[in-house]
Image: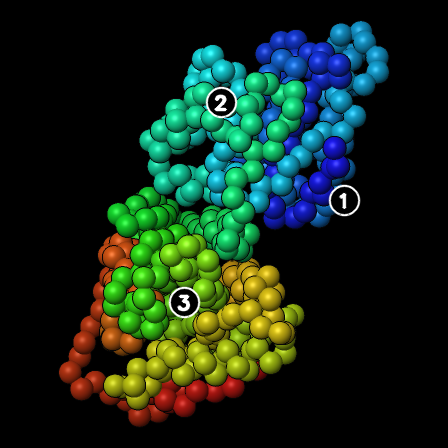
Amino acid sequence: MKLEVLEKNNYYHVYNRGINGCNIFNSDENKLYFLKLASKYLKNNVDIVAYCLMDNHYHFLIQVKNDTKKTSQAFSNFFNAYSKAFNKQNQRTGSLFEKHFKRKKIDSEDYFKKVFCYIHLNPKTNWENYNFSSYQSYLDNKQRNTIYLEKSYVLNLFDDIENIKTVHHSYKNISQIGSKEISDLQGFENLAGRKLQFNKLVKDKFYNYIQQLQDTITSKLEAIDGKAKFQEDLWKRPEGGGGRTRVIENGNVFEKGGVNISGVHGKLPDSMQKYFGVEDAVFFACGLSLVIHPKSPMVPTVHANWRYFEMYDQDGNIVDQWFGGGQDLTPYYLFDEDAKHFHQTCKTACDKHNPEFYPKYKARCDEYFYNTHRNEARGIGGLFFDYCKASDDMTMENWYDFVTEVGNSFLEAYVPIVEKRKDLPYTQEQRDWQEIRRGRYVEFNLVHDKGTLFGLKTNGRIESILMSLPPHVQWVYDHHPEEGSDEEKLIDVLQNPREWV
């Protein structure tokens, strides 16, 4: 059997058995040790999604996250380490496993579901309570047996735990899983179903990325605040999908903020079909959106989002797809060095992919985040890009690399500013000015922002959509700052955007 190459970002069914059908596990302790070694050798190279250990064979469902050479070497080191320990314990010599471990690339959503269920159904009897598979870990959402499972894709794919149980029970007769009967591991049958007709790789990669980015950002912000913690809410959208909202409030540094992810899908609402000029369209959209409102008027508000959108016809064929996003800064008191730092970080991220990106997306940010009814910008800008589609110059993979580069630059762009300004003294008058400016922030979000509009028109979660609104705001009638003041200096820049780098 020709061995498939383990390619980065793809899912694989990995499995093998003892040579000549011999046992590779003689006890529960052997199985625990095998999982311990799997965690040790594989954690930097693959995400383990599911597993099952039987006395004479094993199964893993994995996603590769490192290059082929390093991943293959990690598996080799893992199996060699276990074989040596097993042989020493059992006073045996020679090979323990068949020569090469088998691997099957997961090339469809249908195939993924079947392999996921097949792995858990291997014990055949009492499979629901079997101690050495990942099935119970999904039911109670706990990590077991010393090995960490990456569950996010599965939980998004199946929508909820009850559906995971239902699908497994529908496949209780294991022969229903594949086109051929699977009686044991003897045939290593390919369980592949229909080929995917749209690019699952980009969608899955990006959804996994924003989940990890949310963890990174919220952890760092909590550390800076030192008091408040993010409250997490998991929510579902009745029409399909859901999200993970995290909100921080009343901290030492952050008065209110949200870092949210979502992945929603289903029929595109009529109002949005008219907007895009399509009929009977189905969509998938996922993204991370954040807004942080600091307590001190010396620390700027920041906003960022990175998103991906797909639209399909009734046969599941992709008819459109694009990336979008950006990050922008809204100060209440202008420190030139902060503005330069934020923009330089944005430029550095852009320049790694195309030197034309920063000036183009900086200009678009100045244009987009503009309160036309006030004739002033919302803040000092940053980056804004949308409808980033495949072209002769940029594949969707290239756009993925660019968008994630910008996402990875966020903390570098914002955190040094927060740390420099968070302990500066301020007066009540400066606090009042901050709240007046927050009113302009609210006006933009409710009057002009396309993201807010999309969320409301697609029946998104209202609490998550409107978490961007600050907790304390003022609208003062016909307010104008004093001539020559720091407040007037800010207004001048908002009415006349600068080139910061």
Q: Amino acid at mark 1?
A: Lys
Q: Residue at x 45, y 13 (%)?
A: 126
Query: Can residue 471 be seen?
Result: yes
Is residue 116 or residue 450 the one in the foreground?
116
User: Counting residues from the N terminus, which is met first, the one under dot 2 or under dot 1?
Assistant: 1
Secondary structure beneath dot 1 equals helix
Give the side of residue 96 with respect to residue 219, left or right: right
Q: Is residue 373 above or below residue 468?
A: below
Give the side of residue 467 with respect to residue 413, left or right: left
User: Counting residues from the N terminus, which is met first, the one under dot 2 or under dot 3?
Assistant: 2
- Name the residue furthest front: 180
Mark 2 touches mark 3? (CB < 8 Å): no
Q: Amino acid at mark 2?
A: Ile
For the residues labelled 2 and 1, the Cα–Cα distance comes to 34 Å
Give residue 267's quadrant in the image.
bottom left
- Residue 69 circle label: 1
Q: From the image, tell me which residue sits under label 3.
A: 302
For the residues labelled 2 and 3, the Cα–Cα distance comes to 52 Å
Q: From the image, tell me which residue sits under label 2.
A: 174
Is residue 411 or residue 135 the one in the foreground?
135
